[in-house]
Image (spheres, helix red, strand yellow):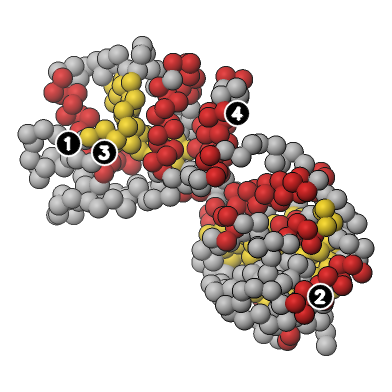
Amino acid sequence: MKKDGIVLNRMYVGEYIFNNLGHEIINMYAADNGKHYLYLNATGNYEKKHKGRIDTMLLTKSHKQNVVEVISMATGLEDVPGADQSLGRNYKGLNNEIRKEQEDYIKQEGEIKYGGIPILQIFNDAEQQSIFITYKAKNFYKPNSPVFIAFDSKCTNKDIPHGALLVKLSQLNWAKTSLKQYIYPETADKDYQTIMDLVNNSNLWEKNNTKVNGHADVAKREISLIDICHLQNDENCFSDMLAYFMEQERYRGLWEEFFEKAKCYSNGCLLGIKLKGSYSVTREKDAKIDGVDSKKCPNGGRIDLFIRDQGKNIVVIENKIKSDINSISTDKNHSNQLRRYYNYVNWLIKKEGNGNEITPHFLIMAPNYNIPDVEEERDKNQELLVPQMSDIYKIITYKELYDFLSTKKKEFENDANFVAFYEAMRRHTYPNVNAYLYYEMEEKFIRRIKEFS
């Protein structure tokens, strides 16, 4: 039997790792003995027909539909006893026979450890199923620059970061129901050769033997109530925190500087909002226009953050973390929530009779992995509405805010609540969800090791 198979191992996926330590985290580190051991998702096993056939593993994470990023590569794979056992689709619990095979192998290898802690101790709790290790790798590499694999011939370089390498497959389909995908020359000859060309391109890869001790600073931060209550993705909680810290007297200068110097996502221009005096922040501002027929002037809804200073500026912020900016149902005039807020502010300015003095600003706050695309709006006759909200609203990313606050740590480092807010924001600075899941899993791994140290 020829050992020429390739397996794509998709990592950092699924609800499991939101609350648990994913076993695949060992893939990114050399053990204390300098050797690389790999875990194949989702349960560490493979069918017997693959035994002795897999030589190469590409470790990937999802980038978008039909596209994965290759984050590392392992070659010269050696099967580990017990990993070729069938566990069944709905497997739960512990198989003592497989467990003994794995324990005997780990003992044979000289008790595999990470950061001085045995792997059996790190994962030996309710999270562990039966398999700790799937393969032992002879060589482990990381790419010199970003590499992406597309299972769709229509994908272009526009679908990946600028300057990255895009490898397109023509025979294989995206494995929707599995986290592992096998490639053999006899089943997908063209795609197999495409992948092998990637594997054999020595200019793309550099050996990597990073050990846990080299990343001990990953888990320095303290666990906060935001972590404990799993509020990192809660839009309302983030809006509440934004409003709270914006209103704190000690931080007003901080926010005034941010609104003036922050850069828009689309064109890099400065916001240039110069808040003056003692501004106020209102959460869930009612955008109902009194005494106006909603059919003639679409209105209503609640503005996430409504900021007003002493007579010069009104700032409307729509905070979007996971939901779509266009997901709020439109009214009979086909107007979405952004237009209703725009109408409300302009009505308010006109009502107060000081339109020459007040400058309205309309912003969307968004995580970098969910940049909204403000759809064009048309009336019932399919005529474009004027103005278009895509021309009115400016997008500010959480990364822009996070990076700004990173330069101002001295102003809030003694405020545990602000620090927790700042650290929770980090997950919203990554270009895709899987990127921050990797960071969080790495943090859990280091923290688990420290607990036993």
- The residue lying toward the viewer, choosing from 156 and 213, is 213
Q: Residue at x 81, y 75 (%)?
A: 100
Q: Position of residue 97 (x, y in %)?
A: 77, 80
Residue at far top of view: 277
Location of residue 110 with respect to 297 vertically, above or below: below
Spatial CA span between label 4 and label 3: 31 Å
Side of 283 relative to 98 (left or right)? left
- Rendering quarter of residue 143: bottom right
Q: Residues within 10 Å of mark 4 (few under 14, many from 20)?
A: few
Report the mark closest to the observer, 4 or 3.
Answer: 3
Label 4 near label 1: C-beta < 8 Å?
no
Report the mark closest to the observer, 2 or 1.
Answer: 2
Location of residue 16 with respect to 386 vertically, above or below: below
Q: Residues within 10 Å of mark 3 (few under 14, many from 20)?
A: some
- The residue lying toward the viewer, choosing from 296 and 266, is 296
SS class of the residue under badge 3? strand
